[in-house]
Amino acid sequence: MAQAKDVVEKFVKPWLDKNHPDADLVILAGSFGRAMKQDSWQPIASSDLDLVIIYSDLEKGGFKAATQVFKYEEVGTVLGEPKPREMMIDTNVHDLASLHYHDKIVKENTNFAFMNVMLDEGYIVRDRLGIGPVLQQKAKKFLDEGPAPTPQGRWQGEIDNLQSYLDCVRKTGSTEEKRFLGVMALIHTCEYALGLHQYWRSGSNQAYRRLTRFFPEEEKVITEAFSDIIRSGKTEKFEALMEDYITRGKTLLPTLPAGSGEPLYPVDKFVPKQEATEIRDMFLKFMTDHLCEALETSKKRGELAHLENLSSSLNFIKMALESKEEVQGGQGTAAMRYLEKHYPDIMPMTLAALDEGEFEPLRKAANDALKHMGGLSYRCLENYYADDIARVNAAEASNDNKVKAPTKHFHPKFS
């Protein structure tokens, strides 16, 4: 474990001088950033270090669009520890234009406000333009305002998804299938609960944090209902919860705006298909590895956090397969059968993880699902924000007053 101040002074600042000497603003986020901002001197046990790196213009730093870079670095020696120790350095690289468009996409389309959370909670390490506090104030205001209302088309799809899981649980007579379907349904239900309150979504395995902090009653009933069905196959609380959520969702539906909420610059229009696929697959590689890494450690954060992480892991394995095959595996029983087609033992693997704490078979399945991407592991991974590439390409076409094939090409990479 390391003191946050030691990490900043001995590692972060020299690392920035070497890797991002021309960056105008750098914010340290995550547990280290919160510790620095709160002037906490408690040692921090963390496997990664989160940085938001902002240039006045991305090209100043050699970037073409908003970029994420995840790289393992040796920190133990630098911090004076007796043994070498590696840490994952997570960097999100933006300029003011990409941040502005990212806010629009987040508010109107994805509702995944992770960047604004990092800006709001983070500690300013470098600020050459004097705008760090301004961006932090804007981030806090952005978060307080909440997302734009979910469009009716998207919300109807979420209602239908919950209904499919409820129907499939009721239809099957197998306790094992009820438990497995409960695992698959959990992350969708957590995100749906946030949607009922028209609040920011998580997009991965962090919905439990928002539910616990802002909607504790929802967190309580979800935990009770899903712990019952996932741990023992008991469905009474699950069915009652799903019926209530579906009813509340249908009540909310007429108050929402019509349509499905297309972004200003759709990725399928402004990003070449091959590049969009590569970016999506690279994101799936990163997230699936991240989720599988936390299969055991998520237990420390409580029952809902642990079960949500398991649910997210299964769903990301499914998404990796769907992306590779360019198909949709469906929801409910269809999703279960789709996974079983590729991994006949996926259900006993999942139940063994729950009952015996045996997670390695699930990791092996995830590694296989991503074999077209080199499996789970990597030392360095670089990926782009697909929405920001759409912005860059749209601007290029607009400036030339015609639609043409983009001259810049974006290919993520890992090693």
Image (cartoon, rainbow, N blue to C red):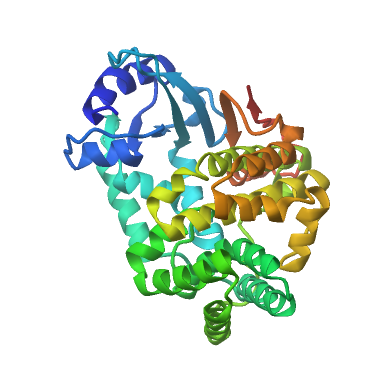
Q: Residue at x 44, y 59 (%)?
A: 303
Q: Is residue 338 left or right of residue 376?
A: right
| Count of all numbered marks drawn on residues in the image | 0
Residue 166 position within the rendered picture, expressed as x and y whole percent measured from the top left: 65, 77
Q: Is residue 99 left or right of residue 171?
A: left
Q: Residue at x 45, y 20 (%)?
A: 73
Residue 112 at least partly seen: no
Q: Hey, which quadrant is residue 9 in on the image?
A: top left
Residue 192 position within the rendered picture, expressed as x and y whole percent measured from the top left: 54, 69
| The one of 45 and 257 positioned closer to us in this rendering | 45
Which corner quadrant holds the C terminus? Answer: top right
Q: Is residue 133 left or right of residue 374?
A: left
Residue 167 position within the rendered picture, expressed as x and y whole percent measured from the top left: 70, 79
Which corner quadrant holds the N terminus? Answer: top left
Task: Note whether 369 is above or below 18 in the view shown.
Answer: below
Task: Note whether 121 is above or below 223 in the view shown.
Answer: above
Task: Note whether 137 is above or below 13 in the view shown.
Answer: below
| The one of 81 and 224 positioned closer to us in this rendering | 224
Q: Residue at x 36, y 14 (%)?
A: 83
